[in-house]
Image: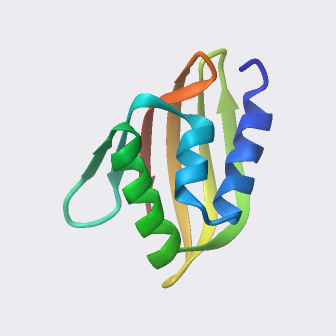
């Protein structure tokens, strides 16, 4: 995908729809992996089934909406951003990196502060 800023904005729209399966189907490769460092232990989700389970949990139990993007950077095949989201515990800074192949995310790294 040549315009990763549009891809990112679509990712936000898919999160707002609160449908993890639709998000994963639209933006993630079949063998995609996601590493999340947000709690005591890292979470590693693999494949569409694992990612769907992770996003369904996140959208139901954690995510309450997007607030703002503080920083955004992209190359031909990757993007990184710092953003603020609303969660069940209030606003939270997130730091994500995504690597894409053929217009789909293959590796997604996510952290919070």
- Residue for point 72% across, 29% down: 4
Identify the image quadrant of residue 91.
bottom right
- Please, which residue is most extreme toward the left here? 41
Q: Is residue 62 above or below residue 97?
A: below
Question: Which quarter of the rendering shows the N terminus?
Answer: top right
Nearer the observer, 98 or 45: 45
Instruction: Give the number of callouts.
Output: 0
Choose top left, top right, bottom left or bottom right for residue 112. Answer: bottom left
Q: Position of residue 56 (x, y in %)?
A: 46, 64
Q: Which quadrant: the C terminus? A: bottom left
Q: Residue at x 80, y 36 (%)?
A: 6
Residue 67 x %, y %: 72, 68
**Is the residue 37 above or below the residue 92 in the image?**
above
Q: Nearer the viewer, residue 53 or 11?
A: 53
- What x and y, as percent, mark residue 33? 36, 36
Toward the bottom, the furthest residue is 89
Percent position of residue 70, x then y: 70, 53
Q: Which residue corresponds to the image point at 75% horizontal and 45% vertical from the top-left?
A: 10
Front-most of residues 86 and 13: 13
Measured along the vertical axis of the image, is residue 104 above or below residue 71?
above
- The one of 50 and 85 positioned closer to us in this rendering: 50
Quarter occupied by residue 2: top right
């Amino acid at each position: 995908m040549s315009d990763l800023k549009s891809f990112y904005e679509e990712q936000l729209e898919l999160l707002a729809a609160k449908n993890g399966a639709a998000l994963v189907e639209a933006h993630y490769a079949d063998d995609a992996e996601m590493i999340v460092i947000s709690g005591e232990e890292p979470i590693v989700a693999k494949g569409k089934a694992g990612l769907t389970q992770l996003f369904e949990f996140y959208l139901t139990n954690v995510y309450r909406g997007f607030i703002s993007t503080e920083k955004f950077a992209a190359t031909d095949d990757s993007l990184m951003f710092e953003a603020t989201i609303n969660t069940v515990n209030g606003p939270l800074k997130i730091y994500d990196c995504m690597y894409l192949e053929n217009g789909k995310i293959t590796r997604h790294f996510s952290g919070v502060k």
